Image (cartoon, rainbow, N blue to C red):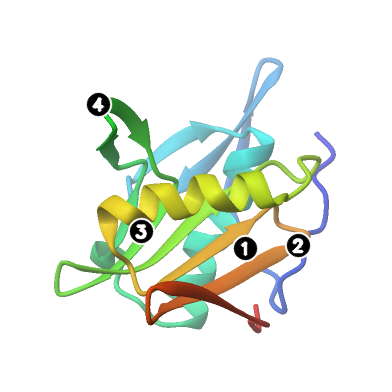
Amino acid sequence: MELPKLNFNEDFDFQIKRDKDKFFIYDLVRKSWLLLTPEEWVRQHWVHYFHLTKRRNLSSLILEKKLVLNGTTKRIDLLVTEKTVAKILVECKAPHIKLTEKTFEQTARYNSVLDAEEIILSNGLQHISAKFVDGKYEFYKGEF
């Protein structure tokens, strides 16, 4: 399987295995092997980034949490918490998916339920970062 090099300052050491014609990646948070999809490749980079680079405890990283938005159940990719308070919402897309205003608005809608201070929208190659200040999002250039 050919995996793209993603736009992070570090290289992470992932555990990847093959079973017949499928590849799996080990998830440190859920302590299980997950099907290695392009989106999972991006999500696992963020898990490793927050745990190994930013030194966040694995228990502060919540993956694929369900939330209800306008009566519909949605699932977020990654939520970074501090003492159970939502701090950073990360929405992951596959590397071939273009990040648009529409995908950012989707993430912002999810955050209207979670109320995290910061959101990151990423396809692994491009990252859009914003902090919620005075009722609006202010974009900034993150160092990942």
Tell me the mark number nearer the camera, choosing from 1 and 4: 4
Name the mark on residue 71: 4
Residue 82 at what x, y percent from top left? 22, 75
Tell me the mark number nearer the camera, choosing from 2 and 1: 2
- Closer-to-camera residue (14/72): 72
Location of the N terminus by quadrant is top right
Q: CA distance from mark 3 to mark 1?
A: 22 Å
Residue at x 72%, y 49% (from the top left corner): 100
Tell me the mark number nearer the camera, choosing from 3 and 1: 3
Name the mark on residue 79: 3
Type of amino acid under label 4: Gly
Name the mark on residue 126: 2
Q: CA distance from mark 2 to mark 1?
A: 21 Å
Q: CA distance from mark 2 to mark 4?
A: 31 Å
For marks 2 and 1, the one nearer the N-term is 1
Is residue 22 visible from the viewing direction of this image? Answer: yes
For marks 1 and 4, the one nearer the N-term is 1
Dot 1 corresponds to which residue? 13
Type of amino acid under label 1: Asp
Residue at x 78%, y 59% (from the top left corner): 125
Residue 2 at what x, y percent from top left? 85, 39
- Indicate the secondary structure of the residue bearing disc 2: loop
Q: CA distance from mark 4 to mark 3?
A: 21 Å
**Left or right for 11, reference 65:** right
- Closer-to-camera residue (143/108): 108
| Other residues around mark 2 within 10 Å, as few (<14) / some (14–19) / many (≥20) | some
